[in-house]
Amino acid sequence: MRTSNRGRLVAAGAASVVLAGTMALPAPAAAEPGDSADVEVTVEIEPIEEPGVLALSIAADSVALAEDGSTLLVRQFVGTLPTVTVSDTRTPAEVPEGAAWAVLGSATDFVGSAGQAPIGADHLGWKPRLLDGGDTGQVSEGEEVVTVLDEPTQPGNNVGLVDQELLVSTFDSGAVAGDSYSVDADLYLRTPVDVAAGEYASTLTLSLFE
């Protein structure tokens, strides 16, 4: 019995040696001095797709009126509104269904630089003129607005630029998207002949609505 036990212990020890030999790890290979490798990293960045916009611009920020066409009863001062451009860089798909845009204008009273009595904005009139309406035929200038000193040329249009008056518009924004349109206007200030001499200034505000 003792001999048999020794034989089993020897066999177990032998098995242990074999197992230890199986788990041994190979030694790491040594790198050659000066070896290197490059990896090229690339990326393609697509341009940002900005949505189109509807915008208004004006060629200049002032205009001086000069006397021309005065009569014995009325003094008249005339000029030309700087070119107004409406640019629409949107695609038709970006335009809300049924949208329309318009540019409206209104003026403040003319205030004298030396304390003269102001000249009401109802003394300033305009006659819009379409310079570039594109090819659709769907952009048009507004009607003439004459002054309070004039007889109306259209029903009720002798009010001057007191309220928001139409300069240019379209009834179909989608049909005219992706283009630019320009307009100006003849301006005229008409006053009584006894208006006080001196410099006057008014602000004409143009607003784009859709």
Image (spheres, helix red, strand yellow):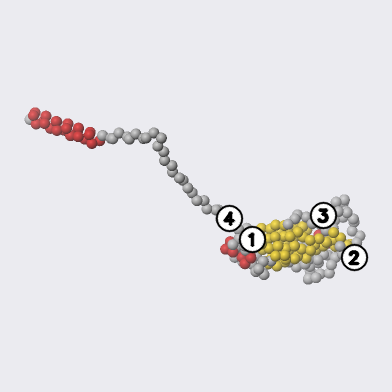
Q: Depth-wise, is mark 2 or mark 3 nearer the camera?
A: 2
Mark 2 vs mark 3, CA separation in Å: 23 Å
**Where 15 falls versus 101 (above or below)?**
above
| Side of 197 where 51 appears, left or right | left
User: Dot 4 lies on which element?
Assistant: loop
Q: Earlier in the sequence, mark 2 or mark 3?
A: 2
| Side of 4 where 41 appears, left or right | right
| Side of 203 where 137 appears, left or right | left
Residue sitting at 28 percent across and 35 percent down? 25
Residue sitting at 86 percent across and 62 percent down? 68
Mark 4 vs mark 2, CA separation in Å: 55 Å
Q: Amino acid at mark 1?
A: Asp
The one nearer the camera, 104 or 84, is 84
The one nearer the camera, 66 or 100, is 66
- Give the residue number, with chain letter if any, for mark 3: 201
Mark 3 vs mark 1, CA separation in Å: 32 Å
Q: Amino acid at mark 2?
A: Thr
Q: Amino acid at mark 3?
A: Ala
Q: Amino acid at mark 4?
A: Glu
Residue 153, quarter of picture: bottom right
- Give the residue number, with chain letter if any, for mark 2: 71
Residue sitting at 79 percent across and 61 percent down? 80
**Where 3 falls versus 189 (above or below)?**
above
Query: Dots 4 and 2: beta carbons under 8 Å?
Result: no
User: Dot 3 lies on which element?
Assistant: strand
Q: Earlier in the sequence, mark 3 or mark 1?
A: 1
Mark 1 vs mark 2, CA separation in Å: 43 Å
Label 1: how many Cα within 10 Å (few below 14, some 14–19, many 20+): many
User: Which mark, by number, is residue 88?
Assistant: 1
Label 2: how many Cα within 10 Å (few below 14, some 14–19, many 20+): few
In the image, residue 3 lies at what x, y percent?
A: 8, 29
- Give the residue number, with chain letter if any, for mark 4: 50
